[in-house]
Image (cartoon, rainbow, N blue to C red):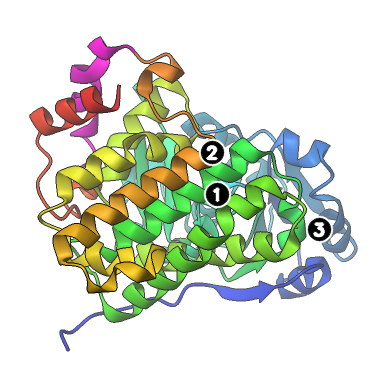
Amino acid sequence: MRPFTFNPGPRLLAGPGQAEALASTLPPGPCLLVTDHDIVRLGLTDAYRQAIAATRELVVFDEVEADPSKETLLAATQAGRLANVASVVGLGGGSPMDVAKLAAYLLGSGDELDEIWGVGVASGQRLALALVPTTAGTGSEATPISVITCEGGVKLAVNSAPLIADCAVLDATLTLGLPSHVTAATGIDAIVHAVEAYTSARLKNPLSDALAREALRLLSSNLITAIEQPQDLEARSAMLLGAHLAGLAFSNAPVAGVHALAYPLGGLHHLPHGLTNALMLRHVLAHNLEAAREHYAELAEILEPRCAGQGSQARAALLIERLDELARKSGLELRLRDHGIAFEEAPLLAKEAMKQTRLLVNNPCEISEGDAQRLYEAAW
């Protein structure tokens, strides 16, 4: 066995109605709840707000937008600083959780944001942190990663162990009735996490592999049910667990080319992150096919067990076909032109993708700027 390290992630509270259990994990003192307007409007924060506020002052910051900006993060941090909070709870999709993670770190460490971008740079002490996802996709509650949109639409990330939450809650009742397009996009996002973790060129290890495989099994076998039967608690629970396992997998074996090419689409066109992954999935996997053939072949048997007797090239190609079919069946529109992106933008998108060096280094094979332009053109 090759030497490897593995971080098991936060303590997990799983099951319906975890509000009081979560509140009991927080230290005394004021708490900052980071969320967004829609989550509040839908009443998803109600039980958690009541449980937390029963024993401490609660400060609610609900200004988080999709692809949260640096300004939003600093505003959340300032709200926590003014209230002298002792803990932070992020409740929502990946955006509120990413803001909560970095706000807890900045408040606890006193570090300056622009000095901690990158992998392993942030090494200070954060405040107590709990995360509650309301979508089954980003896996942000499991990871040490926070992605923020900065000047010019460029996405920068902090990836460091202090951002791992103390506690994460998997309460599938919070995902019941999620709109089908959100379920589809976040579900495909989680599937990409599993696939890219399994094929990561750096830090891939036996534990991340096992988590990625189980995540792919749960996600691929429950996504369409969750879309077509949005009140199915069993399917929703399986999706939420699958997304969490995929998050644990890619927080140890990081994601790669699909994400690198997806980020410019989100940063420049403000498309949902899961959708941008779906737009580039087939094309990047096809680019990687020969370099990642054996790993793709192994994953294909999860989606299509009957292919076990076929050669690795056939199985690897089948994985790409099955994932593409799943994305199409989910109802997502999978061409760049369907989302207002012009063919002529491919060179600019490729140039922006090259800035994602922390992701590109994990890809099974090189993606040059010319390759990226070709892949965007293929996705058009």
* Disc 2 to disc 1: CB gap under 8 Å: yes
Q: Quadrant of the C terminus?
A: top left
Q: How crowded is mark 1: few (under 14 residues within 10 Å), some or many (20 or more)?
A: many
Q: Which mark is residue 48?
A: 3
x 40%, y 39%: residue = 278
Cα separation between marks 1 and 3 = 19 Å
Q: Is mark 2 on a helix, strand or loop?
A: helix
* Disc 1 to disc 3: CB gap under 8 Å: no
Quarter residue 268 falls in: top left
The span picked out in magenta is 342-356
What amino acid type should be assigned to the residue bearing mark 2? Leu
Per the image, the residue denoted by label 1 is 103
Expressed as whole percent of the image width and height from the top left, the position of residue 314 reads: 19, 58
Viewer-side label of 1, 3: 3
Quarter residue 207 falls in: bottom left
Expressed as whole percent of the image width and height from the top left, the position of residue 348 reads: 22, 18
Per the image, the residue denoted by label 2 is 73
Residue closest to the eye, 183 or 352: 183
x 86%, y 63%: residue = 51
What amino acid type should be assigned to the residue bearing mark 1? Ala
Q: What element carries label 1?
A: helix
